[in-house]
Amino acid sequence: MPQPSNGKTPHTRLETRGAQLYLHGLGHFHPENVINNLFLEKLDIGTNNEWIIERVGIETRRTVLPLDYIKETRNQDTRAAVEAATYSNAATGKLAAEMALKNAGVTADQIGLVIAGGCSPDVVTPAEACTIAAELGIEANAFDLNSACSSFGSQMHFLAMMQPELLPDFVLLVSSENNTRTINYNDRNTAVLWGDGTSAAVVSPRVPSRARAIFSSLTSSPQGWEKVLIPRLGHFDQEGATVQTFAIKRTIKCYREIVKDFPDRQVYLVAHQANLRMLESVCTRCEIAADRHLFNVDRFGNTGAAGAPTVLSQNWQQFQPGDIVALVVVGAGLTWASLALEFA
């Protein structure tokens, strides 16, 4: 990783301990269209099921793009992909948010703030939070807080740093990640990774619930900004090997930082869903038992900022009083964030 020339530390860190945010309910949505490994093999881009499983461990992904559109165009024009998509970000945001609101037992009119963010918003302006809020009929403050795949962790950390009395009782966080619209389906290295998914969470700074965030951190190393890119009107691109090594190291460090504080507790890992082999490397090095590692990347692919929170949403009912979840996310920027969630 390149070092800054001014001699200062190569990254900056913000941390909260003791501050509390309560998670009341989560929701998720994945579109119906399935990209399996056979579909990618038939694109004749130099890949097959064995190659994909060996390298990334992903079997299926979801996409908002019609499969015939991908076959015919390989998504060479990302502008056309927006028109071809079966869902907009606002539409998938609404669906995930409705599930989160239902699970939280909260109505849309109780939401006092909407924050959205992810890797590929539909438009540059207005804020995607505004379009999602409009879909839900929410008339409240709304803005975007983006840090690519680490957006959920960044949003939670941002709220944790604020004085509770400055926030409304309930805040809605949404990450609409329909990133297959940015993928070049002639490039096997990226085509095998990405799927579409949307996450939503209802949180509160003061109203108790069965889950609370008792620790959060947010760190950035801007010198690595060029390692992962989605240019405007262009295709996703990354320095794959460099980014994977970086993500593994940061995930291990953040997980160990959380788990050391809970030596006698059952700690689950929910990490950025980049690819299964990356996650397995983290588990091996940290000696995390299989039943303590929760993931969905094998079925849904890399869904960006929505990945870790959708895993949390899908496993919400299994957590018991006393359980700890170490949620660690890494994204472009380069930015990484972590949460310690405690269940009561």
Image (cartoon, grey):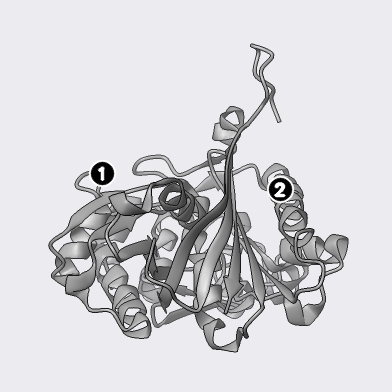
Q: Tell which of 24 and 206 is nearer to you.
A: 206
Q: Quadrant of residue 312?
A: bottom right
Mark 2 surroundings: few (<14), some (14-19) or many (≥20) residues within 10 A:
many
The amino acid sitting under disc 2 is: Arg
Q: Is residue 115 above or below residue 138?
A: above
Q: Answer yes or no: do the residues labelled 1 and 2 have beta carbons within 8 Å?
A: no
Q: Residue 171: x percent and y percent? A: 32, 63
- Judged left or right of residue 284, residue 344 is left
Mark 1 surroundings: few (<14), some (14-19) or many (≥20) residues within 10 A:
few
Q: Which residue is mark 2?
A: 250
Residue 158 marker: none
Q: Residue 304: x percent and y percent? A: 50, 59
Q: Residue 177: x percent and y percent? A: 41, 62
Q: Kindly give the residue lying farthest to the top in the view shown.
A: 6
- Quadrant where the C terminus is found in the figure: bottom right
Identify the secondary structure beneath mark 2. Answer: helix
The amino acid sitting under disc 1 is: Val
Q: Is residue 223 above or below residue 114?
A: above
Residue 322 can be seen, yes or no? yes
Q: Residue 250: x percent and y percent? A: 71, 48
Residue 124 marker: 1
Residue 235 can be seen, yes or no? no
Q: Is residue 248 above or below residue 35?
A: above
